[in-house]
Structure formats: C-alpha cells, structure tokens
Amino acid sequence: MLKLKFSELTSIVGALSSVGASLTLEQAGIIVGIVTAVVTCAINVLYMIRRDQREERMLATQLKAGHEHH
C-alpha cells in the first residue's frame, strides 16, 4: 500500500488545488462530465459482466435440471 508522508501529501494537495484554481468553470464542467462518463461506463461494464455470469449459472442450472428429468 502507498504510504505518503505528511509533507508529500500536503504538496500533492497544494498542486491539485493550484491546478483546480486555474480552471475556468467551463473546463471544470468538462472534466466533471468526462469523469462521470468514465465512471458510468465502468459501472456498466461491471454490471454486464456480473449479469452475464448470473445468466450463465442460470442456464447451467436449467440444463442440469433438464438432463435429470430425461
């Protein structure tokens, strides 16, 4: 795990706040929109993977139950 010293952490926070202060409202809105789109896409991909796994398990269960009846 990454461990930062207090001085390193304050330096990073200072750099980020400096960058944040230099952004216009339009630029900040664009960045927020991009971050929102990326996070939404990642959540959707994870949901689709989980749904696919769930459907595969359900199909395997149905096929197994179907073979037991014959």
Image (cartoon, rainbow, N blue to C red):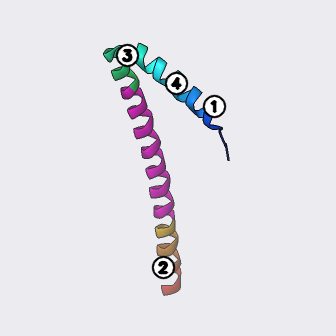
Q: Which residue is mark 3?
A: 27
User: Helix, strand or loop at disc 2?
Assistant: helix
Q: Are marks 4 and 2 in contact (CB under 8 Å)?
A: no
Badge nearest the viewer, 4 or 3: 4
Q: Mark 2 or mark 4, which is nearer the start of the sequence?
A: 4
Q: Is residue 23 left or right of residue 1?
A: left
What's the CA distance linking mark 3 and mark 1?
A: 27 Å
Residue 3 picture quarter: top right
Return the residue at label 1: 8
Q: Residue at x 47, y 41 (%)?
A: 42
Report x, y in % for residue 7: 62, 32
The residue most toward the front is: 7
Q: CA distance from mark 4 to mark 2?
A: 64 Å
Q: Earlier in the sequence, mark 4 or mark 3?
A: 4
**Sequence-first disc among 2 and 1:** 1
Q: Name the residue beneath numbered marker 4.
A: 14
Mark earlier in primary sequence (3, 1):
1
Whether tag 4 and tag 3 are in contact, CB under 8 A, the answer is no
Residue that extends furthest to the bottom in the rendered view of this protein: 69
Tell me the amino acid under the disc marked 1: Glu
Tell which circle, 1 or 4, labels the residue nearer the N-terminal end.
Answer: 1
- Please say if 12 is above or below 59: above
Residue that mark 2 sits on:
66
| Circles 1 and 4 in contact, beta carbons < 8 Å | no
Span colored in magenta: 32-56
Front-most of residues 37 and 68: 37
